[in-house]
């Protein structure tokens, strides 16, 4: 795994870093009580806020609203971006698609049913394995959803590489406009990356957007699912900023 990908998924860029700083603050408090206590309290308060559905839905909505208006251009292919994987031990140690990847496969199957466009799956091997995620997605599409896969891109390790290597295949086949299949909150960074390589990318209409309506009492109660959504949002916000700072030349 590249250093860039390792850092992007590390605790340093996760809300859980606040738990670490809270513990550090508690330790410092043994020597410097005021500094340590303030550090721990601020960290725990920040973690509490980020773990509430109120914060999670607003961060996710912020990302989803970055896509903007969708043009009426006609796509020539469906491109499915790789997501997560899981390690399993049945009947022997292997790897399978994670929930994010399974969602994307499902979205792609629905897209194919309405458009009948050729499908490209993109994704290299996940850490510690030699099985490309693209192969796992292709197997799920063909065997479970009866969706033919025209192309497999099996080298990409990041969203940027998904776009870079897929663009090469698409341009060789005369395709310059595509439908991108991924989660709605991941769509802005994915579309930006494809545009960077001269591919006009449209968001899949089957990727559902989160509902961010009014607030009620339960929106301010922390939950594991909300913290996970917040972690995804922070990852995307930082990832988009990093791409624009380092890949815009």
Image (cartoon, rainbow, N blue to C red):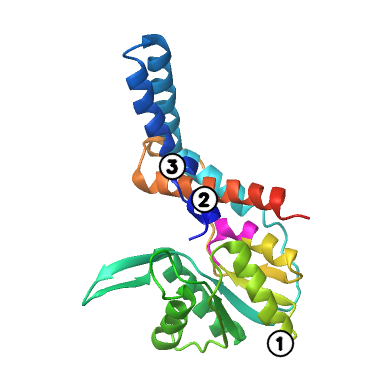
Residue nearest the viewer, comparing 26 with 199: 26
Of badges 2 and 3, the one in the foreground is 2
Give the vertical position of 231 relative to 46 (above or below): below
Of badges 3 and 1, the one in the foreground is 1
Crowdedness of circle 1 by 10 Å Cα count: few (<14), some, many (20+)?
few
User: Residue 239 location in percent, x, y?
Assistant: 59, 51
Which residue is disc 2 drawn over? 8
Which residue is disc 1 drawn over? 173
Residue nearest the viewer, comparing 110 with 244: 244
Give the vertical position of 197 relative to 247 (above or below): below
Sequence-wise first label, 1 or 2: 2
Marking on residue 121: none
User: Residue 246 location in percent, x, y?
Assistant: 70, 51
Q: Quadrant of residue 81?
A: bottom right
Q: Is residue 152 left or right of residue 195?
A: left
Residue in view at x 69 percent, y 69 percent: 201
Quadrant for the C terminus in the image: bottom right
Question: Alpha-carbon distance for marks 2 and 3?
Answer: 23 Å
Question: Alpha-carbon distance for marks 1 and 2?
Answer: 33 Å
Q: Which residues are magenta?
A: 182-189
Residue in view at x 69 percent, y 78 percent: 168
Crowdedness of circle 3 by 10 Å Cα count: few (<14), some, many (20+)?
many
Answer yes or no: is residue 74 visible.
yes
Marking on residue 53: 3
Sequence-wise first label, 3 or 1: 3
Where disc 2 sits, the SS reads helix
Question: Alpha-carbon distance for marks 3 and 1?
Answer: 44 Å
Crowdedness of circle 2 by 10 Å Cα count: few (<14), some, many (20+)?
some
């Amino acid at each position: 795994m590249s250093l860039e990908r390792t850092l992007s998924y590390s605790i340093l860029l996760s809300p859980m870093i606040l738990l670490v700083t809270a513990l550090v603050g508690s330790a410092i408090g043994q020597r410097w009580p005021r500094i340590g206590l303030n550090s721990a309290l601020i960290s725990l308060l920040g973690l509490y806020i980020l773990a509430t559905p109120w914060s999670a839905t607003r961060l996710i909505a912020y990302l989803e609203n970055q896509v903007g208006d969708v043009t009426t251009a006609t796509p020539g292919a469906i491109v499915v971006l790789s997501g997560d994987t899981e390690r399993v031990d049945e009947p022997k140690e292997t790897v399978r698609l994670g929930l994010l990847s399974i969602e994307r496969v499902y979205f792609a199957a629905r897209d194919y049913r309405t458009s009948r466009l050729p499908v490209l799956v993109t994704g290299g091997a996940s850490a510690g394995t030699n099985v490309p995620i693209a192969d796992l997605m292709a197997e799920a599409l063909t065997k479970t959803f009866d969706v033919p896969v025209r192309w497999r891109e099996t080298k990409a390790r990041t969203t940027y590489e998904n776009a870079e290597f897929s663009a090469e295949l698409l341009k060789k086949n005369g395709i310059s406009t595509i439908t991108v299949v991924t989660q709605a909150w991941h769509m802005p960074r994915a579309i930006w990356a494809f545009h960077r390589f001269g591919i006009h990318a449209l968001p899949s209409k089957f990727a559902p957007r989160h509902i961010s309506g009014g607030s009620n009492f339960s929106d301010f109660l922390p939950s594991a699912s909300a913290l996970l959504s917040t972690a995804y949002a922070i990852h995307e916000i930082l990832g988009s900023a990093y791409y624009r700072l380092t890949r815009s030349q």
